[in-house]
Image (cartoon, rainbow, N blue to C red):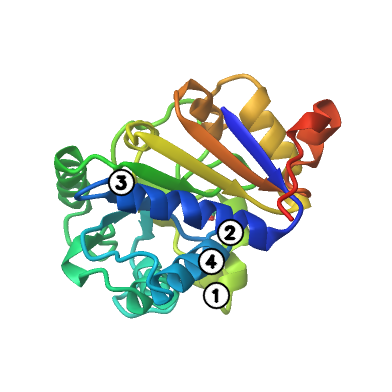
């Protein structure tokens, strides 16, 4: 696992965007796995800046998002489809037909999950961007006795609904389910880029990266992947730095 800890958030954003742009430039038909939440916003902003400066085109890129809430109507501001338009897709030259998210309004959610897995099997992800939930979830794979490998409908933990309630008017509006790529699907990506910020994630970062590999901390399964790059700000990395000060790499 390649862990980098950044002094400034913007340095983390630029570093992540550089890695993504490098992947886009290297491949003929690059496939990116994308994430939502507050953490990737700066990374998407930096990707947009690189596109505007002429450094990169996203015309040949296909994207698959990790997850989507179940039951939020199309156009709802808290759907991940809306988030992706708002933060990335509408600002770059990626064709709409090459951007995929699970459809949380599908009448048959099980067949929607199968459809998504079939598409992912045909277009394996080159680089998967990931955030980390406070309880160690990735995508919406919540801690549990068992984890599901493929795309599935996942009940959301109350703690996750509470964490995400900040984006809604009331907690009751936060969906109770989501469609998410499974941990198995996530681990199939050739490269995984895990980005985490904030002191409130320092303990779970340490647990996920250096603790036991357990379904009770889904992100700990990333330890089994051969090509994971972890980008942390100083706060999220502080418990790791305490053990190994050489991890700190300031980009001035
Ligand atoms: N499903 C998403 C995750 O993919 C994301 O990683 C997590 C952390 O989000 P944030 O970056 O806002 O802390 O939130 C949500 O639950």
Between marks 4 and 1, how big is the CA–CA gap? 18 Å
Between marks 4 and 3, how big is the CA–CA gap? 24 Å
Q: Residue at x 78, y 30 (%)?
A: 246
Query: In this view, which residue lies farthest toward the front?
Result: 54
Which residue is label 3 attached to? 26
User: In terms of depth relative to the viewer, which is nearer, 252 or 82?
Assistant: 252
Q: Are marks 2 and 1 in contact (CB under 8 Å)?
A: no
Which residue is label 4 attached to? 41
| Residue 59 screen position, x and y as percent | 23, 65
Q: Respond yes or no on whether mark 4 lies under 8 Å from ligand 1.
A: no
Q: Respond yes or no on whether mark 2 lies under 8 Å from ligand 1.
A: no
| Residue 225 screen position, x and y as percent | 45, 25
Which residue is label 2 attached to? 13
Q: Helix or strand or loop: what does disc 4 sit on?
A: helix
So how many labels did they put on this image? 4
Nearer mark to the viewer, of 2 and 1: 2
Between marks 4 and 2, how big is the CA–CA gap? 9 Å
| Residue 151 screen position, x and y as percent | 29, 42
* Disc number placed over residue 168 in the picture, else none: 1
Between marks 2 and 3, how big is the CA–CA gap? 20 Å
Nearer mark to the viewer, of 1 and 3: 3
Between marks 1 and 3, how big is the CA–CA gap? 39 Å
Q: Is residue 134 left or right of residue 154?
A: right
User: In terms of depth relative to the viewer, which is nearer, 88 or 35?
Assistant: 88
**Lower sequence index among marks 2 and 3:** 2
Q: Are there few (<14), some (14-19), or many (20+) residues within 10 Å of tag 2?
A: many
Q: Residue at x 44, y 55 (%)?
A: 35
Q: Are there few (<14), some (14-19), or many (20+) residues within 10 Å of tag 1?
A: few
Q: Residue at x 36, y 59 (%)?
A: 68
Q: Helix or strand or loop: what does disc 2 sit on?
A: helix
């Amino acid at each position: 696992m390649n862990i980098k800890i950044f002094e400034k958030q913007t340095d983390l954003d630029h570093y992540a965007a550089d890695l993504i742009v490098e992947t886009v430039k290297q491949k003929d038909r690059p496939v990116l796995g994308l994430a939502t939440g507050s953490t990737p916003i700066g990374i998407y902003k930096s990707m947009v800046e690189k596109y505007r400066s002429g450094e990169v085109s996203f015309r040949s890129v296909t994207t698959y998002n990790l997850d989507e809430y179940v039951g939020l109507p199309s156009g709802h501001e808290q759907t991940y489809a809306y988030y992706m338009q708002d933060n990335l897709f509408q600002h770059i030259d990626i064709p709409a037909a090459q951007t995929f998210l699970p459809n949380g309004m599908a009448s048959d959610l099980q067949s929607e999950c199968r459809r998504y897995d079939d598409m992912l099997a045909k277009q394996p992800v080159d680089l998967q961007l990931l955030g980390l939930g406070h309880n160690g979830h990735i995508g919406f794979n919540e801690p549990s006795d068992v984890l599901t490998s493929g795309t599935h409908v996942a009940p959301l933990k109350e703690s996750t609904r509470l964490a995400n309630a900040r984006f809604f008017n009331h907690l009751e509006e936060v969906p109770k389910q989501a469609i998410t790529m499974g941990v198995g699907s996530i681990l199939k990506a050739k490269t995984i880029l895990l980005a985490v910020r904030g002191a409130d994630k320092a303990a779970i970062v340490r647990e996920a990266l250096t603790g036991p590999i357990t379904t009770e901390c889904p992100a700990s399964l990333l330890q089994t992947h051969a090509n994971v790059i972890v980008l942390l700000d100083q706060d999220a990395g502080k418990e790791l730095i305490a053990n190994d000060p050489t991890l700190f790499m300031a980009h001035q």
